[in-house]
């Protein structure tokens, strides 16, 4: 499926070195963005820049965005997704926060896929 990125983009200050974290989930801490590190945790958005050092500005796609993501495993098209402990998209599991929906399938970890960011309630 060919989709264009439709981004609700905000500028945020990096709380740590985000180099190599492009298209991965981030969270807010102390008013800055840092990578997500706990599988299934709440997110702030998806980092959009490849080379970002601590205290530099980065673009972050937030709720309502269609954005590229790095997959952490195989994901089915239209699956609810959550973050893994490396900020990658994986299929949501019970008791974790759904943070979006896969708009196309990933066959393996490292694939770049389109997702729709639509954080919701815990998976039941």
Image (cartoon, rainbow, N blue to C red):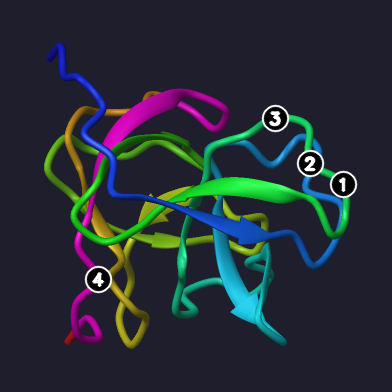
State the separation of the CA atoms marked 3 and 2.
6 Å
Quadrant placement of the N terminus: top left
Mark 3 touching mark 2, by CB under 8 A? Answer: yes
SS label for mark 3: loop
- Depicted 37 relative to depicted 62: above or below: below
State the separation of the CA atoms marked 3 and 4.
24 Å
State the separation of the CA atoms marked 1 and 2.
4 Å
Residue 119 falls inside the magenta stretch:
yes
Q: Name the front one of labels 4 and 1.
A: 1
x and y percentages locating residue 122 in the rendered image:
25, 86
* Residue occupying image coordinates x 33% and y 88%: 95
Q: What residue does disc 1 label?
A: 53
Q: What residue does disc 3 label?
A: 50
- Mark 3 closeness class: few <14, some 14–19, many ≥20 residues within 10 Å: few
- Depicted 39 relative to depicted 100: above or below: below
State the separation of the CA atoms marked 4 and 1.
27 Å
Q: Toward the viewer: 51 or 78?
A: 51
């Amino acid at each position: 499926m060919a989709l264009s990125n439709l981004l609700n983009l905000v500028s945020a200050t990096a709380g740590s070195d985000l180099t190599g974290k492009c298209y991965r989930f981030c969270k807010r801490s102390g008013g800055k963005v840092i990578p997500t590190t706990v599988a299934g945790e709440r997110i702030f958005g998806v980092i959009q820049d490849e080379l970002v050092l601590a205290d530099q500005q980065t673009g972050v796609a937030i709720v309502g965005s269609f954005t590229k993501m790095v997959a952490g495993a195989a994901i089915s098209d239209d699956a609810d997704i959550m973050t893994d402990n490396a900020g990658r998209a994986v299929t949501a599991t019970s008791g974790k926060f759904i943070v979006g929906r896969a708009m196309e399938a990933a066959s393996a970890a490292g694939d770049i896929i389109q997702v729709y960011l639509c954080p919701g309630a815990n998976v039941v």
